[in-house]
Image (cartoon, grey):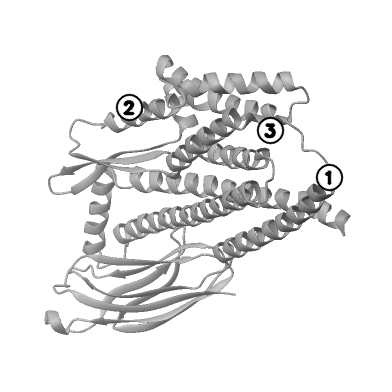
């Protein structure tokens, strides 16, 4: 029984951290994907692209909808934007799962240390592992993104510039643009110092020699005087990129904090706690526990509690992760107006494939005193803009499409035509059901 408990005592923490690493990698992956899709979408909303789209709509109206260059381009842009939002939401879900797993894991370790009298090193090792994961996300995932936009007569609002930077990517950009001093500050205080501090923390606990452990704690204490320097440098970085407002005709900047900044701040907090515990709990780390029958019984109880506790946390984490990763049905239900010589687009996300996209739609022109209820065209497009279904001059219809790849699928209602003079009200009910 004791050998089985001892075996699981080490296997379960490893499984826990492997699960946390998988979550961290997914956060980085989806954050970067979201930024890339936002960048692609922004490139399609510049002044030049907006003019091209307007010309496309003119051609589309002149040809009575035979050439759908304007609506096709808008539908693709909307689909790209939908993909960016989808990946951003996925990153948010994984971030919350990792956050709560970290909180539950730390609470569990605190109970072990302060109730069951486990060595403080148990809590410190857990905090070091979580700090490492938070630092990894904080360095790679975007910490800030912003849109620089301007209003141009006739065309309207256009995006002049989009930037999304993480700490490492920002340092590389600053190096390549000749800003060596700021880039060096970022690398030293936000990359080199945090990694060094984590390695020294591990040495302060696991080094075989007490002299090495004491020296490591001394260096950590010295580094603690610069504990806010990394936060200060990141603040400088945010200020630099937020002040780069782009072209002179821009009228505003819409900035958003990325998940990388939150996790980097989390690392800073946890590393301060690790340093405090190493400095003020030195005796508990270095002094070995004496063996006695009472202590052996207590260790057995602690092992059972630790095994059950980590098992419980892994079950919770696995359930939460499976809930995020598992196929999800999506529902689109809307009622909106498509103005005369305009287009209305709605999108639905196919989270997993294969699956089926099905539903219905209606068009009505009665409230606008239209000659009939028909819409010029209704089309369904896949994530790369290919038309999967198209109907012309109908007032209602059904949608039933097999989906073979995940992504954002767009439903485009086109009300462009030379003889078209009234708007149409569209009602749509559409559902995606994965297999």
The spot of residue 238 in percent (x, y) is 35, 32
Q: Earlier in the sequence, mark 1 or mark 3?
A: 3
Q: Earlier in the sequence, mark 2 or mark 1?
A: 2
C-alpha separation, residue under disc 2 versus residue under disc 3: 43 Å
State yes or no: discs 1 and 3 in contact (Cβ < 8 Å): no
Instruction: Say which residue appears at 77% left-offset and 22% top-offset.
Output: 209
Instruction: Say which residue appears at 67% left-offset and 34% top-offset.
Output: 284
The number of discs equals: 3
Q: Is residue 427 above or below residue 104?
A: below
C-alpha separation, residue under disc 1 versus residue under disc 3: 19 Å
Marks 1, 3: nearer the viewer:
1
Q: Quadrant of the N terminus?
A: bottom right
The spot of residue 404 in percent (x, y) is 57, 67
Q: Secondary structure at mark 1?
A: loop
The spot of residue 79 in percent (x, y) is 40, 59
What is the number of the mark on residue 285? 3
Residue placed under numbered mark 1 in the picture: 292
Can residue 178 be seen at all in this image of the molecule? no
Instruction: Say which residue appears at 38% left-offset and 39% top-offset.
Output: 144
Marks 2, 3: nearer the viewer:
3
The spot of residue 145 in percent (x, y) is 36, 40
Classed neighbour count for the residue bearing mark 1: other residues with Cα under 10 Å, few (<14), some (14–19), many (≥20): few
Residue placed under numbered mark 2 in the picture: 240
Instruction: Say which residue appears at 82% left-offset and 56% top-offset.
Output: 5
Q: Earlier in the sequence, mark 2 or mark 3?
A: 2
Please indicate whether residue 32 sits to the left or right of residue 121 in the image.
left
C-alpha separation, residue under disc 2 versus residue under disc 1: 60 Å
Q: Is residue 353 above or below residue 253?
A: below
Please indicate whether residue 141 sits to the left or right of residue 237 in the image.
right
Classed neighbour count for the residue bearing mark 3: other residues with Cα under 10 Å, few (<14), some (14–19), many (≥20): many
- Residue sitting nearer the eye, 179 or 20: 20
């Amino acid at each position: 029984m004791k050998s089985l408990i001892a075996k699981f005592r080490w296997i379960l923490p490893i499984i826990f951290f492997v699960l946390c690493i998988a979550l961290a990698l997914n956060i980085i992956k989806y954050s970067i994907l979201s930024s890339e899709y936002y960048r692609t979408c922004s490139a399609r909303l510049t002044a030049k692209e907006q003019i091209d789209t307007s010309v496309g709509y003119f051609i589309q109206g002149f040809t009575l909808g035979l050439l759908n260059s304007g609506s096709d381009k808008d539908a693709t842009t909307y689909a790209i934007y939908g993909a960016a939002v989808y990946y951003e939401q996925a990153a948010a879900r994984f971030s919350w799962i990792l956050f709560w797993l970290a909180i539950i894991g730390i609470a569990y370790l605190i109970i072990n240390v302060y109730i069951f009298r486990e060595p403080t090193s148990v809590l410190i090792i857990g905090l070091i592992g979580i700090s490492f994961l938070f630092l990894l996300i904080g360095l790679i995932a975007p910490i800030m993104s912003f849109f620089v936009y301007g209003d141009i007569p006739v065309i309207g609002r256009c995006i002049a510039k989009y930037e999304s930077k993480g700490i490492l990517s920002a340092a590389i950009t600053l190096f390549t643009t000749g800003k060596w001093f700021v880039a060096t500050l970022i690398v030293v205080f936000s990359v080199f110092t945090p990694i060094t501090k984590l390695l020294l923390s591990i040495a302060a606990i696991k080094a075989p020699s007490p002299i090495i452990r004491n020296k490591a704690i001394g260096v950590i204490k010295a580094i603690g005087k610069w504990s806010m320097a990394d936060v200060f440098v990141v603040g400088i970085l945010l200020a630099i990129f937020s002040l780069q407002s782009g072209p002179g005709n821009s009228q505003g900047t819409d900035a958003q904090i990325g998940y990388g900044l939150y996790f980097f701040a989390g690392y800073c907090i946890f590393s301060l706690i690790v340093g405090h515990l190493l400095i003020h709990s030195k005796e508990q780390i270095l002094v070995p526990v004496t063996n006695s029958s009472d202590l052996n019984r207590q260790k057995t109880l602690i092992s059972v509690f630790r095994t059950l506790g980590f098992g419980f946390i892994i079950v919770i984490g696995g359930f939460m992760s499976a809930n995020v990763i598992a196929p999800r049905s999506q529902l689109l239900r809307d009622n909106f107006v498509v103005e005369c010589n305009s287009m209305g687009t709605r999108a639905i996300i196919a989270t997993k494939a294969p699956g089926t996209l099905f539903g219905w739609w209606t068009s009505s022109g009665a409230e606008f005193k239209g000659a009939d209820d028909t819409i010029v065209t209704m089309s369904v497009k896949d994530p790369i803009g290919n038309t999967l279904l198209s109907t012309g001059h109908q007032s209602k219809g059904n949608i039933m499409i097999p989906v073979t790849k995940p992504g954002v699928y767009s439903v485009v209602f086109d009300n462009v035509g030379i003889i078209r003079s009234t708007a149409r009200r569209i009602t749509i009910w559409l559902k995606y059901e994965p297999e």
